[in-house]
Image (cartoon, rainbow, N blue to C red):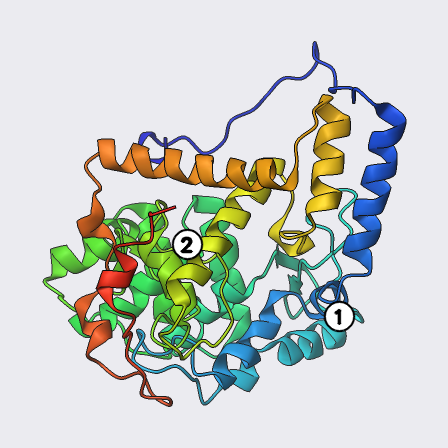
Amino acid sequence: MGAKGLKAVVVDDSNGELRKPVNQEAFKAAVKECAEAIRTGPFTEPFHQFGTPMFVDIDNERGSLPTHNHRAGSFEHKDMINANKLQEITQARVGKTGAGHSCMPTCVVKCSPVFYDKDGQYVTSGFEYETIAMLGANCGITDLDAIARMDRACDEYGFDTIEMGCTIGLLNDAGLFEFGDAARAEALVQEAAQGTDLGRIVGSGTANAAKTLGIDRVPVCKGQGIPAHAARTSKGWAITYISNPQGADHTAGVVTDEPLSKEGQVERGRQSQILMTAIDCTGLCMFTFLNESFGVLTSMINNLLGLNISKDDYVQMGKDVLKAERDFNLRAGIGPEADRLPDWMTKEPLPPTNEVFDVPQKEIDNFWNF
């Protein structure tokens, strides 16, 4: 659809009506229980206060903040783009913190950061870690104003900010971008929107840009730019990038346990993807952190639809959908040979931990045996 220039699908609900729960009172009670579980969860308050930009410090500390085109896992200027800096800027400009905004009505978490310019005018919201990391640290850029403007431009033009940050960082290898040059990065986003010769290369994404420019060190998996939890130092997360049918998608299966260990990561990645796929089916945000709150989830489903599904039924739904996605890929010609990280990530150490990705491919090849 994107290749055809489609930006949005509008649904006219003037002759429709909201689905009514089969067991209305019980459903209301289940929703209330769900909201309370979210509100009192251990992650809600930090996400509400800082939003995902708090991961700038977290990933930097564990050496998994992509920096200078995935050549380092920490950024010496991270304090210029982290959550504290975002809050400092927002407090100075509009007298409030950067997060605490609802990305949609009735949101309980309210983790969306808003960025304002030096005149106190709104620039962008949903100013997320992935955007700040990939258009910031990965490109060596320390100017949050420039990063925010690029975020807004990408939103307006329909570019993915992870892919854009990966691609601009890659251009350093071709001598077309210098790390830290925020003005050049902004100009490249505009060129992509205008469709200049170079802009068409940038707008085609990391894999296509590398192919066009003759670059063989390419940070992609299944043609998609690798996001801002570095694969060599977040090895469980890397299993998601490798195996998930959507490619290098950091939201498809979050794995944070023992990030530097190669042991048990395939099983962790498998279970995380199954549960993430299941919760995606409900329409709930991943930042509700309800992935394993099976009683709350099945209660809402059962009372809405008049069903009687169990925890096992719910988990099986995740497995079935994940395998259906895999089947689509196989029939589209995207087979097991695509379940690979770039070979250089298994050989090139990532400072400061100097880790390589060393989970055995034989174990990864058994991912789908469930």
Which amino acid type corresponds to the residue marked 1 in the rendered image? Thr
Give above or below for 285 relative to 120: above
Name the residue tied to disc 2: 249
Residue 234 percent location from the top left of the image: 42, 72
Of residues 114 and 357, the one nearer the viewer is 357
Above or below 370: residue 46: below
* Residue 170 pos. (x, y %): 25, 68
Give the answer, above or below, for where 201 lies relative to 64.
Answer: above
Q: Secondary structure at mark 2?
A: loop
- Whole-percent x, y for residue 342 in the image: 21, 65
In the image, which is nearer the foreground, mark 2 or mark 1?
A: 2
Task: Kindly identify which residue carries mark 1.
Answer: 97
Which of the pair 342/191 is nearer the observer? 342
Left-right relation of 68 to 277: left
Q: Is residue 27 visible?
A: yes
Numbered circles on residues, count: 2
Query: Residue at (31%, 34%) from the top-left corner?
Result: 327
Which image quadrant for residue 95? bottom right
Residue beneath the point at 88% across and 37% down: 29
Given the current orientation, which residue lies at the most extreme top position? 15
Look at label 2 and name its amino acid.
Asp
- In front: 256, or 201? 256
Which quarter of the figure is the N terminus placed in? top left
| Residue 76: x %, y % from top left | 45, 90
User: Mark 2, residues whose alpha carbon is within 10 Å: few (<14), some, or many (≥20)?
Assistant: many
Residue drawn at x 46%, y 62% as measured from the top left = 268
Q: Earlier in the sequence, mark 2 or mark 1?
A: 1
Question: In the figure, is residue 362 to the left or right of 19?
Answer: left
CA neighbours of label 1 inside 10 A, class few (<14), some (14 to 19), many (20+):
many
Image position of 245 (left or right of 302): left
Q: Nearer the viewer, residue 352 or 289?
A: 289
* Residue occupying the point 84% across, 46% down: 33
